[in-house]
Image (cartoon, rainbow, N blue to C red):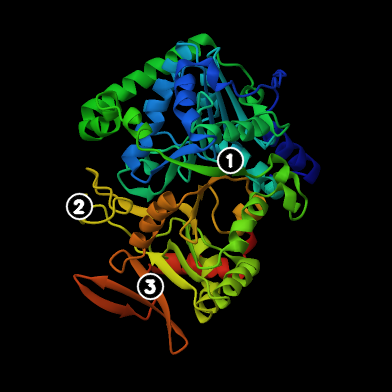
Amino acid sequence: MRIEQPRLALLLLTLLSGGCTTPNVPHQPSQALPASDSAFGRSIQAQVAPHQGQSGFRRLSDSAEAFTARAELIRSAQSSLDWQYYIVHDGISTRILVSELLDAADRGVRVRILLDDTTSDDLERIIATLAAHPQIQIRVFNPLHLGRSTVVTRTMGRLFNLSQQHRRMHNKLWLADNSVAIVGGRNLGDEYFDAEPNKNFTDIDMLSVGPVAEQLGHGFDQYWNSALSKPIEQFLSTQPTTRDLINLRTRLDESLEETRKQNHALYQQLMSYTTHPRLDAWRQELIWAWNKALWDAPSKVLSEGEPAPHLLLTTQLAPELDGVTQELIMVSAYMVPGRPGVVFLTGRADAGVSINLLTNSLEATDVPAAHGGYAPYRQTLLEHGVQLFELRRQSGDNGDSDSGPRLFHSGSSNSSDSSLHTKAMVFDKQKAFIGSFNFDSRSLLWNTEVGVLVDNQQLAGRVRELALEGMAPTLSYHVLLEKNQLVWVTEDDGKQHTLTREPGSWWRRFNSWLSSTIGLEKML
């Protein structure tokens, strides 16, 4: 049967409009609550007072520590919890955190959750049901208004507005009582906490205590109160009820009990914070330092072309990049420097700065297309003396926790592979930046990001140590030029060997080649 063009257009429009006709949900502005509103916040203020405005920091490179810190901060919060995330995946770790979150809301903690709109795919109704709790508010950032009813129509809607779809909130922020924050590369999902049976991510977060948390709270408020942030209920045809929330909590409890029975080792690993809390001990191990909390302006995503410099996190970070004189270490899961990045890196290298870059190898990356955006620049970087290291695929069954750096060998009970997801920089062994920012065009121009710059030699040294461990020949390929050709030098069983063909499957090679050939660089 032939469908006339006007009728076809009407049909498409009808499909795409599904799921977006809802009652008007008020957009009420709100602000981060003062730390002094809770006993926990006041205890942080008392701890901070002797340090004359400095903040306290502790790196969270171990996945178990990163999960424990989040869970304990929920339990510690007495007035507010503010979360901002690009990705939230369903799984046992997320379900545990949501269960703790509901308990916190029950005891009167105000919860604000801001998610990038892509997070809600397939989960919109479930996520919105949490907002049926009177203490929980959930908003989505830069939402698509077309075709939200199904995955198919949602995908079609995105094709109609690729520019909007391309501009995402990539921030990862966890804030408790406006006094303690976690910022870094981890999203929420089993793969970020060493709980995924197939593949996990290696990452670093920063536990940040004191004035820096208040700074990050101001940044969260900018996003939360932006016109780009919409209540998730706005996109539902019917509003979740208290009964829906009760049913959701019942299913949540049942699923956790089932996990406890069926996967007891993993369950016990994640729930260790209930019997062996560590937050109080970590508070005594903090490194106190001056810092800057950095974030992109939310309006960055509204720019028709390249955003104005004053909107960018990188403008705030530029003095550190331009001012480096001795050594620059960069760790980025997705490294697509583009021409401006190459000009910067080669210029600093030509000026005598030692530059070491660590990223995923083709065989390890979870986004081969991103590798295709990086690969064409390798030879130029190497010709100017930039050192390139590409993390090998890390197998989870090749040793225990004593077999290598904890950042790269978790020592967990599962045997999953690992891929680099870290975003970190170290400037002249003195300053360290940890956040959500990848060294690529997406982070620079299209996505919004957040991070913390810490001025402290001890902390910078610890981040630097982790980076150098990742560059070790047993863990990474050292990419070199031999007779004008790329080679990959590595070590196995105590013996160094050189590969003349890039490691990776034919499918990964094809994806990388395709990305490079059709020019996906700016989309990466």
The earlier-in-sequence mark between 3 and 2 is 2
Q: Kindly state the secondary structure of the residue where label 1 is placed.
A: helix
Residue 259 numbered tag = none
Image quadrant of residue 249? top left
Q: Position of residue 42 (x, y in %)?
A: 48, 20
Q: Amino acid at mark 1?
A: Val
Q: Which residue is mark 1?
A: 152
Q: In what quadrant of the picture does the N terminus appear?
A: top right
Q: Is residue 351 left or right of residue 143?
A: left
Residue 478 numbered tag = 3
Crowd tier of the residue under label 3, counting other residues whose Cα lies within 10 Å: few below 14, some 14–19, many 20 or above: many
Q: Position of residue 210 (x, y in %)?
A: 50, 32
Q: In what quadrant of the picture does the C terminus appear?
A: bottom right
Q: Amino acid at mark 2?
A: Asp
CA–CA distance between discs 3 and 1?
43 Å
User: Residue drawn 44% across and 53% down?
Assistant: 457
